[in-house]
Image: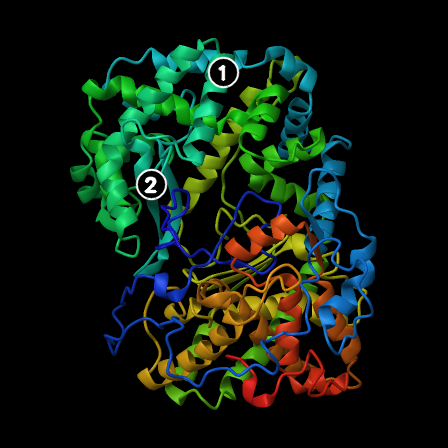
Amino acid sequence: MKKRLISSILSLIIVAGTFFTGCGSTGTTNVTSGSANEQQSTMTESDENKESEPIDTSVETTAAEYKPVADRPGAKWIDSGIYGTYEGMGDISLKDDFAAAINRDWAENVKIREGAENVSARTEQTDNINEAKLAVLTGEKKDDQDLTSLQNYYALLTDWDTRNKEGLDPLKPYVEDLMSISSVEEMTKYYSDPGRNLYGTPMVSVSIIPEPLDPFVNMLCIQNVSLLSDEPDDYQEGAPETDGLAIKHKTAEYMLKRLGYSESEANDIFDTAKGFERKFLPGIEAIMADISGDPTSTLTIAEFEEKYKKLPFADIFRSLGYDVDFKGKIMVGYTKIVDSFDENYSDENIEGIKAWTLVNTLLDFTKYCDFETYEETAKLNGSKTINDADTYALKVMEDTVPSMVDQMYVNYCFDKSIKPQVEELTDMMVKAYRKMLMEEDWLSDETKAIAIEKLDNIKLHICYPEKVYDVKCDAIGTAAEGETALSAIIKGRRYFRLSEAAPLSCKNDGTYWRYDTYYSTLGAIYMPQDNSMNILAGICGGDYYDESWPLEKKMGGLCMIVGHELTHAFDTTGANYDKNGAQTIWWTDEDGKAFQERVDKLLKYYSELAPMPQVSDATYGEEGAQLIQGEAISDLGSLKCLLSIAKEQEDFDYDTFFKQIAIIQKQARYEEAEKEYVDTNDHPVEAYRANVPLQNYDDFLNFYDIKEGDGMYLAPEDRITVW
C-alpha cells in the first residue's frame, strides 16, 4: 500500500478513539483508531520501569493457523449490506447467514434517497436527530440567547436568495486585506487577528491532546501545515498534477475567477502558492520515506519560542485565545515540514506566503459562499451529494458551532430521563466486564489486577456532560439587524477555535468532555489517551434504544455498543495505555505473548474472510485484517460480556437479543461505496459484525440448533474470541 501523509490527523500520535457506529456520525468529527504497532512506545515512570515492546499485532505468527470449516470462513454468507443484493435470491436460512436472514425484509423495501450512497440503522437515527434539531431551529423563540443565535444563524444560512445575490462579494474585503500585506511583520499581525484571518490559525492544523506522559494535562499539538499536496511528485518542475492537487487547482481557480481575477492571474496565484509550498519538499519526502518513524517533538514553551523565532507561533496562538503558557508544553507533528515553514517565513517569500494563505483560505470557504459556489466546487471535488437547504444549514452549524448545537439538542430535543437509565445499564456492563476479566484463565493475577484497575478507572461519559467549557459565541443577529451569513459564519468559526482552545487551561480529569466529542450526533467512542468511554446522546434512539423496550432488546442494541467501547480499552490499541491514559506496557511478557496468539488467530480468520463474496472472491488479506482487528476484537468482547449477563436473567429472551444485534447492523450501500468501505474503513462490513461474534458462542448456536454444515457453525477449536 502506498504510504500517505495524513495532513488532518496525526494518526501516529493521536488515537482519539473509535466510533462503534462506523466513525461516520452526522457530526464534523471523524475520529479513528490506529493499530497498536502504529503507536509510539512511550514509557511512564512505573514502579517496574519495564523495557518491553508494545503489544505487536502483525500477522506474522507461530500460533496454530486457523482451519476454515469449508473452503474459507463464512463460505455460505453474502455481504447483505450491498443495496439490491437480495434481488432474485432464494430463501436464506438464519442457520446459514443470520444477518442476511434477519435484515432481508428491511433491505428489500428500503430506498436510498437521492444524493445519498447508503441507508442503515445509523442513517435512520441520524434522520431522527436532524428532524428534532430542525424543529427547534425553525420553532418558537425562547428566552435563551444561544438558541436565538442558532435560530438566526439558521435563517441566514437558508436565505439563499440573499446569499446568491451577494455572491462572493462579502469575501472581497478579506482578500484585499490579505493581498495588501507587504512584510512578514504585517503577516504575523494578520495571522494573530481572528477578525481578519478567516482560516483561524497560522496555516497549521491543530488539536488539543492529553500529554502522553501526564494524561491529566492537556497540550497544544500543531499537527502539520496546511499542505496543498502530500505527493512529492507534485513539486517536480513540469510534472503533471496528481488528481488531488488538480482538484484543488481547479477549485482555487474557480474561486479566484469569481472574485474578479482573470484566469491567468488565478493560475499565477496558485502556482505561486505551490512554489512556496515546494520549500517544504524535503520534509514531505522524509515523512513519505519513513512514515513509521517518530514525526513529533514535544517542547516546553521556552524551547518552542526559542525554536520558532521567525514565525512566532506562540504569540500568534496567545492572540487567538490559546493559553499556551498554562502548562507550557507543545507537541509539533511532522517537525521537518513545520520547521520549513518557519525557516522560509521571510520578507523575501512574502508573495508566496500570501498566495499560499489565500488559496488555502478560499479552499476552506467553498461551502460558506453562495449556492453556485457550493454546488460547483462540490462537483469539482467529485461529490455526488448536494444537500437541501435544511441539511446544508445544519451541517454548517455542526461544523462551526457544534457545542452550541449539542446543548440545544440536550435542552430541547433529548429526554433527560434517559441518561440515568443508560448509566444504570452501563454500570451493569462494567460489573459484568470486571467479572469477565477476573475469570480469564489465560491472564496472570498480576496483569489481571492491572486490567481491572484500568476498567475501574474508565471515565464514563454518558449521553451529555454535566459541565461544559465557559466559552460564549458572539450573539448572532438577524438580517434586519445587519447580520449576514458570512459574518455569522465568522463568529461561529471564532467560537469553534475558542472552544478548541478551552481545554488547555483545564485539568483533564473527566470533569469536561473533549471539545470534539459532539454528543448530539450518533456515536459512541472510547479514547485511550484519557481512558474515557463516551456514549453520546444521539445514539439513544432508533434501533439502538427505547426506554420501553425489554432488557433483551436494550442489550442487543445500546448495550452491545457499551460493551464494544469497554473492550476497546483492551484491544490492540487500548492494550498499550494504562488506567490514566499514559502509553505504557502493563502486561507481563507471558501474558503479552498469550494475548498476541489470540489476536493472531483472529487476524488469520479475517484475512481469509471475503467481505463481498457475491462481487469478488477477494479476501480481507493480511492488510485488511490488520485494519479491522480492533473493531473485531471489540465486537466479540461485547457479546461475551452480554452473554454472561444473559445467563443471570430468568427466562431470558435470546431470540430478541440476538436479532437486535443483527438489526443495529442493517445496511444498504451502493456497491462502489461498499468497495470503498472495505478498502478504507477500520470496521468489518456490517453484516459480518453480527455474524462473526454470534458464531463464536454456543449460546447462539444451541438456541437456533445450528450444527456442523450450517453456514453459521464454527467448530470450538476454530473460534477466535480474544477476550
Q: From the top left corner, tell me how far across and down residue 88 is, in percent.
A: 81, 60
Left or right: where 17 falls relative to 328: right
Circles 1 and 2 in contact, beta carbons < 8 Å: no
State how far apart marks 1 and 2 are (Cα).
26 Å
The answer to whether residue 569 is seen in the rendering is yes
Query: What residue is disc 2 on?
Result: 224
Instruction: Characterize the local packing of mark 2: few (<14), some (14-19) or many (20 or more) Cα atoms within 10 angstroms.
Output: many
Q: From the top left corner, tell me how far across and down residue 689 is, in percent.
A: 62, 67
Judged from the image, the secondary structure of the residue bearing numbered disc 1 is helix
> Foreground: 268 or 25?
268
Q: From the top left corner, tell me how far across and down residue 514 is, in percent.
A: 48, 51
Give, as a three-letter code, the residue at label 1: Leu
Marker disc for residue 171: 1
Relative height, residue 460 to residue 174 (above, below): below
Relative height, residue 364 to residue 601 (above, below): above
Q: Residue at x 72, y 51 (%)?
A: 125
Relative height, residue 543 to residue 504 (above, below): below
Residue 382 lies in quadrant: top right
Residue 442 lies in quadrant: bottom left
Which callout, 1 or 2, points at the residue further toward the start of the chain? Answer: 1
